[in-house]
Amino acid sequence: MSDVHIGYQLTLAVPSAYTEGFSGRAFLMETEQSSPTFRTALSVEAINENYLCSLDIFLGDVKVWSSSPLSQFYTREKCVLELTLYGDLRLKDENERIGWRSGTSGQGVERLHLLRTGNLVLVDSLNLIKWQSFNFPTDIMMWGQRLSSETRLTSFPINSSNLFYSFEIQYDKIALYLNFGSWKYSYWEFRPSIKKNITFVQLSSKGLEIFTGKHKRIDQITSNGPEPLRFLALRNNTGNLELYHYSAERGNFEESYEALNNTCDLPLACNPYGICTSSNMCSCIRLIESHGFQSDCSARNIEGLCGRNQAEMLELRGAITVLNGIPNKANATKEVCANVCLDDCSCVAAQYKNSGECFLYKFIRGIKQVERGSSLIFMVKRPKGEDEGHGRHSGLQKWVIIVVGVVDGFIIFLVLGGVGYYVIRKKLKNSSVTGQET
């Protein structure tokens, strides 16, 4: 069936003991169409020593919408989905505690319906929509779905609690952002060829269409293949924007387009203080010397380090960050840009553009290796005077190398001397034996 009526209730039991990797689902609705079909499910998943209760929509085996990013709801004994007699769709636990709701009580809702587009809707007796999942997008945009400047896609990187990606529509461009608190940095953008204000974007069979006004299309991000598109995804493992089609031959979804083709252009390609090299491998930035990279390092916590007596800015030659923020200062020099970061206790790095723009950063991510002579200069904050300590360490290291070299030379001399003595003595002995025989 593809709909349920008011008064409906579905209960899913939660395991008494926590089991890592547990995932339980009860499907309640499915669309009538050729495979892959859309299905609605009540789900219980084991996450971070707790059980997450959520309402989900699947296209085939791909989760295309969930209530959990909007409101994470953890339960202990039961996960209950209820469409009340007053038309409110709810998730609740064994104690009647409500963890998520549609907020449509008293609006004349008669049933919950799953459309062939994957849009989950609550409608009244006249089939007027009172609530729909398309108005609350998560990290996936379906075929036929629209996103206006008032909505966005969001995705949370794996193993990161304080960062999230967002795909946003602005009046002059669409862009991907890495968000950290109130700080926001773009790492990809697309500007329409026709300079008109963007009102919404819509996913069609051929690509992501960009509109101005109500119906005028001004540009399009086109799929790389002839197959009709099914959804657009903002990936939580990479932050990349990708378009997907369904392959009936292989029985799965395949990528038709990706915004970023190079690993080093992804914002979190490497760990903090890591750098993506020209060979698409992760190394670490070297904070002791003024150039080069090293294969091993540990992230430093320099947050709160500020003042020109405590810190200094190190120019990292041959490297930039792919993250672009709003310029903190315009018409500045490189020295002024460095001092602005030094005086800001929350700043850990700065990027200076030769045009005079200065960008500040609250975390060090998205660093990649570039050819020398770039118009961008990337600088990292470090405790003042680290070079002196490194100089002493280098002197000690050189002394150790000299000592080791002398010792090794002495050992080699003894070994060679012993071998020579043995050869000469053996020859003398053989000569003596030959004389006696004669």
Image (cartoon, rainbow, N blue to C red):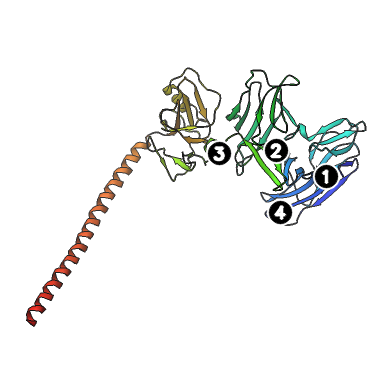
Q: Residues within 10 Å of mark 4 (few under 14, many from 20)?
A: few
Of mark 3 and mark 1, the one earlier in the sequence is 1
Q: Residues within 10 Å of mark 2 (few under 14, many from 20)?
A: some
Amino acid at circle 4: Phe
**Left or right: where 281 falls relative to 203:** left
Amino acid at circle 2: Glu
**Percent of width and height locating residue 218:** 68, 21
Residue hosting label 1: 30
Residue hosting label 4: 22
**Residue at (64% x, 21% y) in the render:** 172
Label 2 SS: loop
- Residue at the limit of the structure toward the bottom, as seen here: 437
- Mark 1–mark 4 distance (CA, rounded to whole Å): 23 Å
Q: Quadrant of residue 415?
A: bottom left
Mark nearest the camera among 2 and 4 is 2
Q: Pick the residue in front: 412 or 86.
A: 412
Measured along the vertical axis of the image, is residue 339 above or below residue 391?
Answer: above
- Residue at the limit of the structure toward the right, as seen here: 125
| Number of callouts | 4
Point out the image quarter for the C terminus. bottom left
**Residue at (61% x, 42% y) in the render:** 237
Query: Are the residues tagged 3 and 4 within 8 Å (C-beta)?
Result: no
**Residue at (68% x, 53% y) in the render:** 21
Q: Quadrant of residue 431?
A: bottom left
